[in-house]
Image: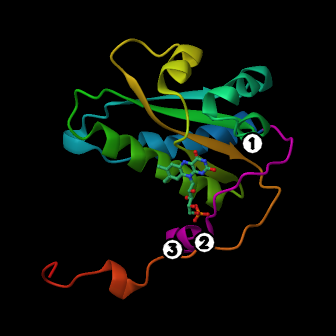
Amino acid sequence: MDVTTAIQKRRSIRKYKDKEIPKELLMQILESARLAPSGANRQPWQLVVVTDAKKRKALVPVCKDQKFVGECSAFIAGIDDPVQKWARVDIAIALEHIALVAEEKGLGTCWIGAFDQEKLRDALGVPPGLVVTAGMTLGYPDEAPEARTRKTMSELVHWESYS
Ligand SMILES: Cc1cc2nc3c(=O)[nH]c(=O)nc-3n(C[C@H](O)[C@H](O)[C@H](O)COP(=O)(O)O)c2cc1C
């Protein structure tokens, strides 16, 4: 699958099959985050990957009761060092790499921004000073949602200047 197709086909998946991701495949997907660009190549990121079902289920109340956090195969927390200027941008790029490679491999993802920062940090054992910028569920899709609407090109793109 080429990148354009992966971008076009990707949907947020909130219903997953109860199926483990083979370790080798999970590592291939995570490799896409490792290769992501970052400001000055600082790579100010860490990923916590939670595959253990009991641990994932414990994250559901921490993630505003989003049930599918407990039903996916892996929950990935994108952690960054807020002292680094571009840290939030960097981890976002890395997570979206994961989303696109997951799509290519036949898996689904959903970004998770709705969570309690302190509780998630505690649950994942994140050291002081670092923050969880976003999470992502990963697993085998058990739904095929329609594409959500997007702005039109003319609503989005300004040629040569904003006004
Ligand atoms: C930063 C960010 C945070 C998000 N947080 C959540 C979330 O907590 N729960 C959820 O169900 N979807 C979440 N989403 C998914 C968006 O709702 C979704 O991307 C958007 O509705 C467009 O749908 P699509 O991804 O299927 O194209 C998040 C997306 C982004 C980029």
Which residue is label 3 attached to?
4
Mark sitting earlier along the chain (3/2):
3
Indicate the amino acid at tag 3: Thr
Establish whether ligand 1 lies closer than 8 Å to the Cβ of label 1.
yes
Give SS at disc 3.
helix
Distance from label 1 to label 3 (Cα)?
27 Å
Establish whether ligand 1 lies closer than 8 Å to the Cβ of label 2.
yes
Q: Residue at x 67, y 44 (%)?
A: 138
Q: Quadrant of the C terminus?
A: bottom left
**x then y, percent, for residue 129:** 33, 16
Asked whether 111 or 60 is in front, the reply is: 60
Which residue is label 1 attached to?
68
Distance from label 3 to label 2 (Cα)?
17 Å
**x then y, percent, for residue 139:** 73, 46
Question: Magenta stretch mostly in which secondary structure?
Answer: loop
Occupied quadrant, residue 154: bottom left
Occupied quadrant, residue 108: bottom right
Which residue is label 2 attached to?
148
